Image (tube, grey):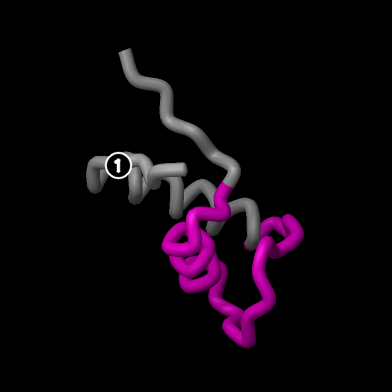
Amino acid sequence: MQTPKYTRYERARIIGARALQISMGAPLLIKTPKIDPLEIAIEEFTLNLIPITVKRK
């Protein structure tokens, strides 16, 4: 499966939404020693594990 190309705005929105989920107590998708929700969300994004999609017209 090919990794989709996201604009910088889509990338920021996906990572921000996931960081908010993590900070509100959502389960982590990876094992990591990091505790900052933003750093965890970025790591999940780079591993292509965030289950958020972008709909384009």
Quadrant location, the C terminus: top left
Task: Out of 10 and 36, give the one closest to the viewer.
Answer: 10
User: In this picture, is 34 found above or below 4?
Assistant: below
Q: Is residue 22 magenta?
A: no
Q: Is residue 5 above or below residue 50?
A: above
Q: Farthest top residue?
A: 57
Q: Residue at x 34, y 48 (%)?
A: 11
Residue positioned 67% across, 61% down in the render:
29
**Residue 9 occupies which quadrant of the picture?**
top left
Task: Report the front residue among 24 and 15.
Answer: 15
Q: Position of residue 13 (x, y in %)?
A: 39, 44
Judged left or right of residue 47, residue 6 is left
Q: Nearer the viewer, residue 22 or 1?
A: 1
Question: Height in image: 21 above or below 1?
Answer: below
The residue furthest front is: 1
Magenta includes 24?
yes
In the rendered structure, which amino acid carries the disc numbered 1?
Answer: Tyr
24 on left or right of 52: right
Range drawn in magenta? 23-50
| Name of the residue lying farthest toward the bottom | 33
> At which x and y percent is residue 16?
45, 52
Taking depth in this image into account, of 47 and 42 the one nearest to the observer is 47
Residue at disc 1, secondary structure: loop
* Mark 1 nearby-residue class (10 Å; few <14, some 14–19, many ≥20): few
Q: Which secondary structure type mostly characterizes the magenta part of the structure? A: loop
What percent of the width, then of the height, locates residue 38? 48, 67
Q: Which residue is mark 1?
A: 6
Count of marks, rendered view: 1
Which residue appears at 54% of the width and 58% of the height? 19
Q: Which x, y percent locates residue 4? A: 36, 41
